[in-house]
Amino acid sequence: MTTTTGPHPTRRLILQGTASVVLFGLGNLAFAPARAAANDKYPEDAFKQKSEADAIKALYGKTAEPSEKVKLDAPEIAENGAVVPISVTTTLDKVTSISFFVAENPNALAASYRIPDGTMPSIANRLKMAKTTNVVAIVEADGKLFSATKEVKVTVGGCGG
Amino acid sequence: MASSIRVRATANGDITEVQALIQHPMDSGFVKDAKGELIPPHFIQELKFACNGKEVFVADWGPAVSKDPYVKFSFKGGKKGDDLKISWTDNKGGSDEITAKIA
């Protein structure tokens, strides 16, 4: 048995390493929903994400599923990408927030609205679009995410020269 | 100076519809000026609506919201003559607020 003392410390090290990785991973998982639930601070980080998927993850810490109960109203063709009227309304209950993403803008997240109890889950606003791409509306209802997507053709981009 | 916020809030039964228009450049930081230099980002980050002191709607905005932003929403619980306070802050520390009456 004395000869086997050599490998033991190494194996222990490896096990310890794995354990800390697991803990670290769990820590991350535990943090994500807490951040989404807090929901009361300007989501600086989410606005800095480039892609739509990263922005959704940074904002909510989970993914959305498409739902027919989310109605996204946007023009087929927007002549001026600087001002694209977009609105969303939903028949879902317990809505706590609604967010708008423009897939190929420099930063995908355009606007996020917090909906307290008693406020209707229906919003109209105007967004800038760099080019023809998908507009995604995400509705957070009862802790779950639902989305609607529509492609808007942009003739003149609204994100700069 | 005239307020940067124009708001129309109308109560119809139990539901109050709010439309707000704010004068703000909403510079994205991606646009160049006539000299070819980038205009630094300058945009509203938070816009809050409170009816009689209770928050009814909060908007978190990035620079992709159009210049002179417009937003429309409705909420329950407001009635004619109630106070609706609207306030915004931008990324440069600028801010403005106004209190309107629900009509």
Image (cartoon, coloured by chain):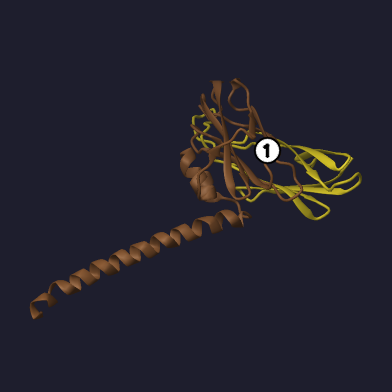
Chain colours: A brown, B yellow
- Quadrant location of the C terminus of chain B in the rendered image: top right
* Left or right: A27, with A42 as reference point: left
Number of labels in the image equals: 1
Hey, which quadrant is residue A82 in on the image? top right
Q: Nearer the viewer, residue B15 or B68?
A: B15
Residue A127, relative to residue B60: is it above or below?
Answer: above
| Residue occupying the point 36% across, 62% down | A22
Residue B38, relative to residue A77: is it above or below?
Answer: below
Q: Nearer the viewer, residue A112 or A116?
A: A116
Q: Position of residue B34 (x, y in %)?
A: 54, 27
Tell me the crowding category of disc 1: few under 14, some 14 to 19, or many 20 or more residues within 10 angstroms, Cα based: some
Q: Nearer the viewer, residue B21 or B91?
A: B21
* Left or right: A29, with A100 as reference point: left
| Residue occupying the point 52% across, 47% down | A46
Q: Position of residue A138 (x, y in %)?
A: 59, 39
Name the residue type under label 1.
His
Q: Is residue B43 visible?
A: no
Say which chain tag 1 marks.
B
Q: Position of residue B83 (x, y in %)?
A: 86, 49
| Residue occupying the point 70% across, 49% down | B95
Q: Position of residue B51 (x, y in %)?
A: 81, 50
User: Tag 1's secondary structure?
Assistant: loop
Residue at label 1? B24
Q: Residue furthest bottom?
A: A2
Q: Is residue B15 visible?
A: yes
